[in-house]
Image: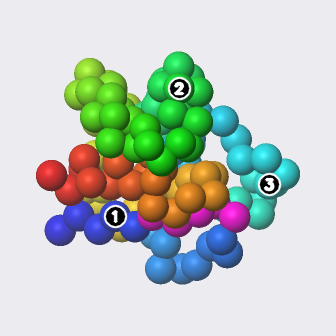
Amino acid sequence: MIVVHIKRVYEKPSTSDGRRILVDRLWPRGLSKEKARIDLWLKDIAPSAGLRKWFGHELAKWPEFQRRYQEELEVNESALAELCEVLRHEPVTLVFGAKDMEHNNAVVLKAYIER
């Protein structure tokens, strides 16, 4: 059974997180590697720089962002394969830096994986 959680990187890590995977292209501002406790950083599974900049966390663009990001995931076989390999063996927490807990790439990625 695949267990996937999502959590903001600025939240305190916990033992129930399992393997903590950062799914952002950029390292979170003002956070040390020790404090973040990231086990794996999958930069390549994050939305492209162009898509990220286009979205700009504008809620009106959320439906289109989801569609475009899923299209990017469809052709991103190597990054998805790496994530799926980890998921086969242990629970995972997809860690992200965005302030919005409901409208971010980790939400889209989790839904994509669970399909």
Up-down relation of residue 22 to residue 13 (above or below): above
Q: Where is residue 56, by image quadrant?
A: top right
Instruction: Locate residue 94 relative to residue 24 in the image: left or right.
Output: left
Residue drawn at (44%, 43%) of the image = 60
Mark 3 Cα shell of 10 Å, populated few (<14), some (14-19), many (≥20): few
C-beta proximity under 8 Å, tags 1 and 3: no
Q: Which residue is mark 3?
A: 31
Q: Disc 2 residue type?
A: Trp
Residue hosting label 1: 4
Residue under the image location 25 percent in, 47 percent down? 112
Provide the secondary structure element on which disc 2 rests.
helix
Q: Nearer the viewer, residue 36 or 102?
A: 102
Q: Nearer the viewer, residue 96 or 93?
A: 96
Q: CA distance from mark 1 to mark 2?
A: 27 Å
- Classify residue 91 by image quadrant: bottom left
Q: Which residues are magenta?
A: 6-10
Q: Nearer the viewer, mark 3 or mark 2?
A: 2
Measure the alpha-carbon separation of dots 1 and 3. Answer: 23 Å
Spatial distance from mark 3 to mark 2, Cα to Cα? 25 Å
Q: Is residue 57 above or below residue 18?
A: above
Q: Earlier in the sequence, mark 1 or mark 2?
A: 1
**Type of amino acid under label 1:** Val
**Residue 8 highlighted magenta (yes or no):** yes
Instruction: Identify the secondary structure beneath mark 1.
Output: strand
The residue lying at 20 percent from left, 56 percent from top is 114
